[in-house]
Image (cartoon, coloured by chain):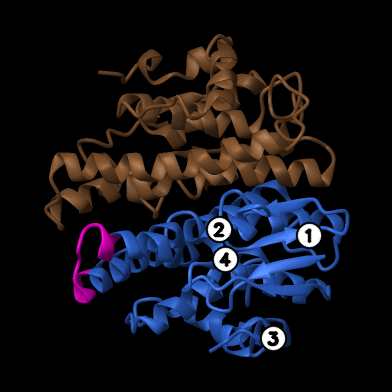
Chain colours: A brown, B blue
Amino acid sequence: MKLYTYWRSSAAYRVRIALNLKGLEVEMASVHLAKGDQERQAYGAINPQKLIPCLELDDGMVIAQSLAIIEYLDETHPNPALLPADPVARARTRALAQAIAVDIHPVNNLRVLKYLKGVLGLSESAKDTWYTHWILEGFAGVEESLTRSAIPGPFLGGAAPGLFEICLIPQLYNARRFSVDLSPFPRLTAIEELCVALPAFKRAAPENQPDAQ
Amino acid sequence: MKLYTYWRSSAAYRVRIALNLKGLEVEMASVHLAKGDQERQAYGAINPQKLIPCLELDDGMVIAQSLAIIEYLDETHPNPALLPADPVARARTRALAQAIAVDIHPVNNLRVLKYLKGVLGLSESAKDTWYTHWILEGFAGVEESLTRSAIPGPFLGGAAPGLFEICLIPQLYNARRFSVDLSPFPRLTAIEELCVALPAFKRAAPENQPDAQ
């Protein structure tokens, strides 16, 4: 398998964590987002959506969308499981992962920030305010959900990290990059502290990618 | 079960279609998005993320996020299936559904449009340009994906609609509401024409909801 990735893409970061948790080694092809490589014909021929990441299977089939890729990996390589077995627990894990991957990340994605600055002419500071706003609003909901429900701990699903942590850690990485105050989210940062010490998360971190600059 | 819904919420519209396809009758509780009911304490006590929809189970457990709810319904009521059985086909269906539900819809969500107009002071026309931009960009990728791959037809997964169509139809409804030119997307509109004639889609349509205005 080959993963089209970019060191700073948090959607690619998610898939890298999932691959590491599953113990899967894949070829990595870097697509330079900041230079616009995803807009070029060569990448469009692979993923018509022109977004990172996508996973090319050995038969040439391509799977786009980080959440779809991660569910595919979980279905085809079931151990260790990234989702609990019980349907309600699975739904809760997916919902909290999506609170981040659907309702925070796409609104703060590079192409959106480019539109804000380029088309709408926003200042750097107005853009940062936008970025921070959606992170704070999204994290507040997730933190409150964790506070209310009894979590087995130390991770959402118990002894091991899964889909939720896979989405949480890259988003926290982005928040720190933009100096967002994370003190209102002690449950999220407690999970982060545990995750970043794990080899699967360390190896997947942006600064540890070959295309990091 | 009880669905917290709003007639014009396209994420709620997705869940309504899924419930109808499964033949499940649930209680409907309207949360008036335009009046800000989702921001009130009463709804925050149910869904800390303050977004529509969420599904309350008979034991009081609440599942947020439309995609998580739909996967939950599919796992607990497997017939008719909303995802194919083959892992690669499942991944393709999820990826195309997410191309809409993750990369178009959240960027055009009501709260984002409110921020554009309220905080950033965008004109109605600049807001509409934003809205149209993300729909055109997103649909272009989905249309191209359908063009390239051999689809059994008439729906993405074959004889019956599933997760992809559940996400596509509400997004097309929104596009039409904003008078987006859909002529570049003949494959999407061909699927739409078939879907909107089906009772499960008709009953779920915004204008057929009790809280429609």
Q: Left of A144 or right of it: where is A50?
A: left
Q: Hey, what amino acid is under mark 3?
A: Arg
Kindly report which numbered mark, 2 or 1, lies closer to the viewer in this rendering.
Answer: 2
Which residues lie in the magenta part? B116-126
Q: Which residue is mark 4?
A: B11
> Is label 2 in contact with label 4 (beta carbons under 8 Å)?
yes
Circles 3 and 2 on the same chain: yes
Q: Which mark is residue B51?
A: 2
Where's residue A126, x and y in %?
19, 45
Of the numbered discs 4 and 3, the one sitting upstream in the chain is: 4
The mark that comes first in sequence, 2 or 4, is 4
Classify mark 3: residues with Cα within 10 Å, few (<14), some (14-19) or many (20+). Answer: some
Residue A98 in view in this figure:
yes
Q: Earlier in the sequence, mark 2 or mark 1?
A: 2
Q: Is residue A52 or residue A87 the one in the foreground?
A: A87
Q: Secondary structure at mark 2?
A: loop
Q: Mark 2 — on which chain does it sit?
A: B
Mark 4: which secondary structure?
A: helix
How many angstroms separate mark 3 from mark 1 (CA)? Answer: 18 Å
Image x and y of residue A16, in percent:
51, 26
